[in-house]
Image (spheres, helix red, strand yellow):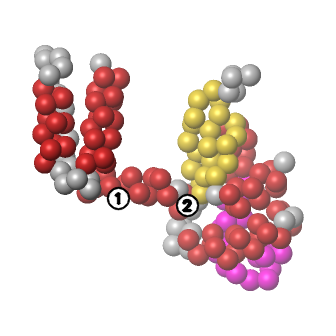
Amino acid sequence: MLSNMAASLILHKRLSTTVAKAKALRKYVEPLLTRAKSDTTHSRRTVFAYLQEKESVKELFDNVSQKIANRPGGYTRIIKTGYRLGDNAEMCVIELVDYNEDMLSTAATATTGAKRTRRRGGKKGGSNEATTATETAATPAAEAPEATTEATDSNEETKNAE
């Protein structure tokens, strides 16, 4: 089971599973990723003995090993996603750290984004919609849809926080 999950993780870069399986998979796959840093015949054969799948070994040594070459460890990330409906098992997504484009792009936009301030707790309504209207009017027409989606997201976040 672990070799199949490891091969799928290497090929697809992320995998949805239970937390217990993800923790076991992390212990299984991280030493393989460390061995993949040195592209020798011995390391390829050792990794193939664990994975038993040519395509995943090729992907690991050709693409993945170059992305993780400078990373000293911690090649996988486990993100808990909630509970499964049928048996209430705790589910998560295990992924390779350097292959998460969503997190990499949000980290880049978060540093370049505008500074947000908190609303005072005493007032309710009114002022927040007025500020979003002035922000959308001030932005050019090409960026207006992005600004409105960000504004609605922040409105929803503040409503959920209350």
Q: Give the image quarter of residue 132.
A: top left
Q: Which residue is mark 2?
A: 99
Residue lying at 16% horizontally and 36% vertically, measured from the top left: 133
Q: Give the image quarter of residue 24.
A: top right
Q: Position of residue 158 (x, y in %)?
A: 28, 27
Say which mark, if any, is on residue 108.
Answer: 1
Q: Position of residue 28 (x, y in %)?
A: 74, 54
**SS of the residue under disc 2:** helix
**Magenta part of the chain:** 27-46
Residue lying at 56% horizontally and 42% vertically, measured from the top left: 79
**SS of the residue under disc 1:** helix
Give, as a three-letter code, the residue at label 1: Ala
- Within 10 angstroms of label 2, few (less than 14), some, or many (20 or more) residues? some
Residue lying at 58% horizontally and 45% vertically, measured from the top left: 78
Q: Position of residue 36 (x, y in %)?
A: 69, 72
**Residue 158 sits above or below residue 68 on the image:** above
User: Would residue 44 be visible to someone looking at this image?
Assistant: yes
126 to the left or right of 58: left
Q: CA distance from mark 2 to mark 1?
A: 15 Å
Q: How many marks?
A: 2
Residue lying at 41% horizontally and 57% vertically, measured from the top left: 105
- Within 10 angstroms of label 1, few (less than 14), some, or many (20 or more) residues? few
